[in-house]
Image: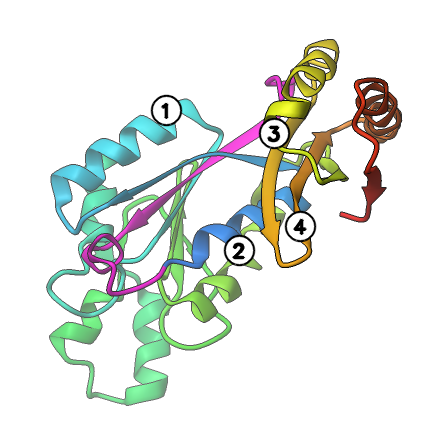
Amino acid sequence: MDRAEGAVRAAVLIIGDEILSGRTQDTNLRDIALYLGAHGVDLAEARTVPDVQEEIVAALNALRGRYDYVITTGGIGPTHDDITADAVAAAFDTELYEHPDILAMMTARWGDDINPARRRMARVPVGGELVKNPVQGPPGFTIGNVFVLAGVPQIMRGMLEDVGHRLRHGAVVVARTVRVEGSGESAIAATLEGVAKAHPAMSLGSYPFFEAGGYGSNLVLRGRDPAEVNATVDELIVALRGAGVENVRAVEG
């Protein structure tokens, strides 16, 4: 799908050795993509980096200069390897300070038992604003066009609810699917390519499936103009049948 004028684009930066090692399976990317899509924001890129400050800073600076927004996940906990706040402050060439609102939240929860590990979670960059955490623990923060969220999926999803209203919204992308059964991708590739070239503002993708009852492909059409999407579905079905592909139909989703 072409980068339409006025489209709002975002990137996700996933931070953590545990993701790269395979010990933890990331689900945040999917949830963020769905959330942004519902607000008319295209998720255009995702990167995963280790708990190394230089790597985080380099990736963050590259992404925030290229996209309207960057959402980071992970690395804002109480342990020594939670260095996302340090890296974000370095990327913005600013200092960290202990936010009084976070310290007040901690005092209300733990009284005077705010040890150094807990105080690490109170640090935000100068110039940053808090992102509410309705689940548990301290909030995230935002600075510039960057939103810094937790890595724990349940907490991250809660924080997202305080992100959407801060975004510039674009037109929501509409998706429809044409299901082809009993034909491989090689039999439909030329027809799909022809229709895709005729509609450069849309995205047309082929996703093969192999099931007990047979095989085929789900052809997913995505675009911002619902009328064009619907018309292209009909056009694609007619073109496929004209090419000898008979078992084809539009399905929900």
Residue 51 appears left or right of 69: left
Give whichever of discs 1 and 2 has the lower sequence position.
2
Amino acid at the residue labelled 3: Glu
Identify the image quadrant of residue 21. Answer: bottom left
- Which residue is at the front of the view, 240 or 34? 240
From the image, tell me which residue sits under label 4. 214
Q: For the point 61% across and 17% down, which residue is it?
A: 2
Task: Please say whether residue 171 is visible from this viewpoint.
Answer: yes
Q: CA distance from mark 1 to mark 3?
A: 38 Å
Is residue 4 within the magenta segment?
A: yes
If you read the primary sequence from the N terminus, does the residue marked by circle 1 or circle 3 appear first?
1
Q: Characterize the local packing of mark 1: few (<14), some (14-19) or many (20 or more) Cα atoms within 10 angstroms.
A: few
Asked whether residue 94 appears in the rendered view, the answer is no
Question: Magenta residues?
Answer: 1-25
| Circle 4 or circle 2, nearest the eye | 4
Q: Secondary structure at mark 2?
A: helix
User: Which disc number belongs to residue 185?
Assistant: 3
The residue identified by callout 2 is 31
Q: Residues within 10 Å of mark 4 (few under 14, many from 20)?
A: few
